[in-house]
Image (cartoon, rainbow, N blue to C red):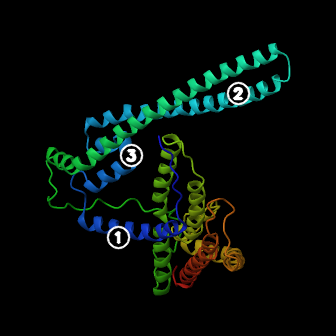
Amino acid sequence: MPSLTFVLPHWLYWAGLILFPLITIYMVAREKKRGLPQGPSLGIAYLFLICSGFVGLHRFYLRNRWGFVFLPVFFAILYVNTQISDSREDVSRTRAAVESSHSAVTRAKSQDAAVLKQAETGLSQHEAEYKVASEQLAQRRSWSQWLAILLAAMIVGDAILLPRLTRRRREIEGQTATAEPVSAPPDFHEIGTGQDPTKNLHTRLTDIIEWVNIRAGEFVAYWAIIAVFAYFYEVVGRYVFNSPTNWVHESMFLMFGMQYMICGAYAYYEDQHVRVDVLYTKFSARGKAIADIFTSIFFFIFTVTMMWTSFRFANDAIGMNEHSFTEWEIQYWPVKLAMPLGAALIVLQGLSKLAKDILIVTRRGA
């Protein structure tokens, strides 16, 4: 198999983190308007083909048994690549032995004939082993290439046939692409602990803050899908093409670090942060609000300090145009800029909650 030398450009990484969530949010909103999908989706079928067509997952999505044909070809490629790796080690080992034997022959020329003959015999033996190992490596590479061509031809063929296969599957299920949309499924159970007394309380200012944090949380949540594609590429590159990368791991842990910071406010809005609620759960709504007001003192000390120190941290990174020390050399300042941004969002969410807690406490009859 040929090696993969692709390295993700920096501009594509940052553009992907911005554009992919926007496109996904638009597509999700469009599907919600359409209602439940009518049978297999051609778009999803092509997505399976692109991501895992080498194992026939697109065929399995369409409930087509011909997907099993892809499995032996793919496993054969994995097996041959394992053999290629072993052959590379054999070639490297025998080449080193040949070079060592050449040195031994050179040294033996200044000695008696018996030593020289023994060195030449060893050289001939090692050269024969090197030739066998090289031929075996070339043969296994040829097998791998032909298997790759076969698998690629199967995938390309299915890419052409996929609309027809999807349409046929819809007909089998008694559905068509033009069927009337049905009502959307009921919403899932609301997330959160259910302990926050301010969850269903609304004011104009707090609604604006929470809208921003909900949208920010939704935006970065879709980054998790990017990780699926990235690690998919890494696994295929490592085990199929013998081409492991460093940039995939680095790009993903930086992305998840930014996601962790930015979605903190959304988690706070949904009451998902860890709390010690042994006594808290027994309080009334007013008692919980009073407890939250008291503990908010420590909350704001921590979050405001984090916002200020991380801002200075990010400002230094921007000033020096900080990059990573790996060969990918990705810019670090956008990553560090996510720290004060996330801290600012969680401070705003804390102010929103504090305002609603005060509103609960000051209400008469609460």
Q: Amino acid at mark 1?
A: Tyr
Mark 2 packing: few (<14 Cα in 10 Å), some, or many (20+)?
A: some
Q: Is residue 138 above or below residue 126?
A: below
Mark 1 packing: few (<14 Cα in 10 Å), some, or many (20+)?
A: few
- Residue at point 73%, 28% (across, down): 102
- Find out whether the residues at labels 2 and 3 contact each other: C-beta distance under 8 Å: no
> Which image quarter: residue 129?
top right
Q: Nearer the viewer, residue 302 or 334?
A: 334
Question: Could you say where residue 51 lies in the image, as x and y percent from the top left?
Answer: 39, 50
Q: Is residue 282 visible?
A: no
Q: Nearer the viewer, mark 2 or mark 3?
A: 2
- Residue at point 54%, 83% (across, down): 359
- Give the CA distance from mark 1 to mark 2: 62 Å
Q: Which residue is mark 2?
A: 97
Q: Which residue is mark 3?
A: 52
> Which image quarter: residue 260?
bottom right
Q: Which residue is mark 1?
A: 26
Q: Amino acid at mark 2?
A: Ala
